[in-house]
Image (tube, rainbow, N blue to C red):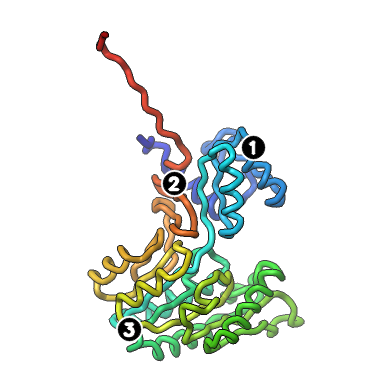
Amino acid sequence: MIDLEHSPKMLILSYIVYYAVIPSNTYPESWLSPGVINIINGYGREAGAALVSHPDVDKVAFTGSTETGRAVMKAASASLKNITLETGGKSPLLVFKDADLDQAVKWGHIGIMSNQGQICTVTSRILVQKDIYDEYISRFQQMISKHKVGNPFDDDTFQGPQITQAQYERVIGYVSAGKSDGAKLITGGKAYKDIGEGKGFFIEPTVFSDVTEDMRIFQEEVFGPFVSITPFTTETEAVRLANSTVYGLGSAVFTRDLERAHRAAGMLESGMVWLNSSNDADFRVPFGGVKQSGIGRELGEAGLATYSQTKAIHVNMGLTL
């Protein structure tokens, strides 16, 4: 049983810790006693490895790349630790011909370009029914042109720089991969220099169309303002394409047909499905993926359950032998 009187505070805390690392001395004393939360700064290979392998640590929760997640899982297995992993993603966004196209474009844009595309759940593969394929691409381009790339401290800026030079170079590298594989570059694909002295790790919002499932940019996580758009004909094909990666974090479906929405949601191999939206989050709702996108859940009652153990206590009330 969960103590409902206290669980809201626990859920809010889970939400805060999950989305931001903030100084532990800023938590209200009414929430937690001193020492309940301890923030240790350090590099993964040192501080992270020590935490995961330490015998006094009973639970490990990791958010990061799938490759590092495997290493965490391997290290934790030595003492059979309880683990939660939230790793890579290549989330699809399906747009059927009966969808509200204006909303599908807006959600599709914010679903990939928010935070420079540096969110594990970004819907980086947009699958569009052929009947509206060209129209969707045209409107998507228009949507990109309305949003500013620039100084992240300016109120009117939508997209800032990538987090590191390494990530910047990674995204640029996938532009080359998309071109070499035969995808069509619709917009972007290069550094954005129209700011200050032209320095910084800024990348133009990048869109490739006519992307097929055998291409690297369809299969691999880019983690940047980079989206691939692929046409489909039938619902069956759309679901097959959506499921044809090793990842299974999130997915989105845009349609006015509620039966189709629920049918597709049931067939999509992902831990979360958004119907007629993208990247919604609520601390009361479980968050997590399947396949190589992770193990376990954060947030919600399911998230609390992963941080506890079930114990069975048998009491003899009079049975004698």
Report the amino acid beneath label 3: Thr
Mark in the foreground, 2 or 3: 3
Q: Which of 5 and 94 is in front in this view?
A: 94
Residue located beneath label 3 in the image: 233
Tag 3 near tag 1, CB within 8 Å: no
Residue 25 appears in the picture as rendered: no
Q: Earlier in the sequence, mark 3 or mark 1?
A: 1
Q: Which mark is residue 303?
A: 2
Q: Where is residue 39 in the image (x, y as percent from the top left)?
A: 65, 44
Report the amino acid beneath label 2: Gly
SS under mark 1: loop
Q: How far is disc 2 from disc 3 in space, using C-alphas? A: 38 Å
Above or below residue 5? Residue 236 is below
Answer with left or right where residue 112 lies relative to residue 316: right
SS under mark 3: loop
Quadrant where the C terminus lies?
top left
Answer with left or right where residue 287 lies relative to residue 199: left
Residue located beneath label 1 in the image: 54
